[in-house]
Amino acid sequence: MELIRIRGSISSAGFADGNRFVVGHWERSPIGPFGDVMWGTPDGQRVLLAGSQEIADFVTSIYNFDDIRVGNLQTESDGRETTVEGLGLDLYLSGGMARVIPFSRPLLFTKFIERPLAKTLMGVETFGTSSRGVSEWYQARQWRWVKDGHANVDGISLGPPQRFSQPINVGFSEPPEKPAIVSLQVAIKFP
């Protein structure tokens, strides 16, 4: 089994019409820096937006989607603000005060101690196995609750971000119900 690590941020928000977005902005990964968007549509479709076929192949080796769209996609995130432009999506999220976890943790700590804490405090899983048999450990470094933002799909405004109304059902965990920007490292073990 191969263990790899990626580092960057995950930003997530829901919108009044039922659209939900999870933006990955990865500074370090085996395929280099990249961004992707996991999009849950109001009718329950799971859509992946990716800037290249290599990115799409990497993400779909871990998660399941109903639709995969590859094209010009730009993501940026500094842990405080996140932007996405491309493939019909224009999204901006701005976070508030940072909550910092100033120390690294071993994977066993994340699996057995951090996991129940994260589930209780934020409603998220820090360890699990995807439907494709890939194990993942999510280790947050800091997080911010989103204070401001907007999204447009094909030029139509979705309004301000709000809590997730329903799960996306892409992986073993869902993002926090409350919109958030989380800086983290993810350890990934392929079968």
Image (cartoon, grey):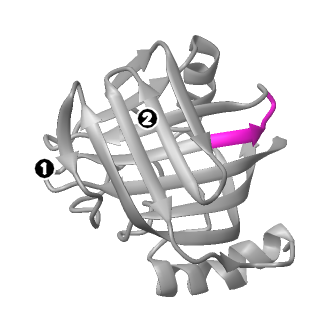
Vertical order, 171 against 33 (above or below): below
Q: Provide the residue span drawn in magenta.
A: 25-30
Residue drawn at point x = 50 percent, y = 54 percent: 11
Instruction: Tell me the crowding category of disc 1: few under 14, some 14 to 19, or many 20 or more residues within 10 angstroms, Cα based.
Output: few
In the displayed structure image, the side of residue 156 where residue 65 appears, left or right: right
State the SS at label 2.
Answer: loop
Which residue does the numbered mark 2 point to in the structure image?
Answer: 64
Q: What amino acid does circle 2 point to?
A: Asn
Q: Nearer the viewer, residue 78 or 109?
A: 78
Image point (59%, 33%), residue name: 35
- Camera-side residue: 182 or 61? 182
For the residue pair 40 and 9, the one nearer the viewer reads as 9
Label the magenta part by its dominant secondary structure. Answer: strand
Q: Position of residue 49 (x, y in %)?
A: 44, 27
Q: Is residue 13 left or right of residue 10?
A: left
In the image, 66: left or right of 165?
Answer: right
The disc placed on residue 17 is 1
Q: Position of residue 9 (x, y in %)?
A: 63, 52
Q: Is residue 191 visible?
A: no
> Is 116 within the magenta?
no
Circles 1, 2 touching at the beta carbon (< 8 Å): no
The reply to whether residue 5 is visible in this rendering is yes
Q: Position of residue 126 (x, y in %)?
A: 61, 68
Q: Residue at x 21, y 62 (%)?
A: 165
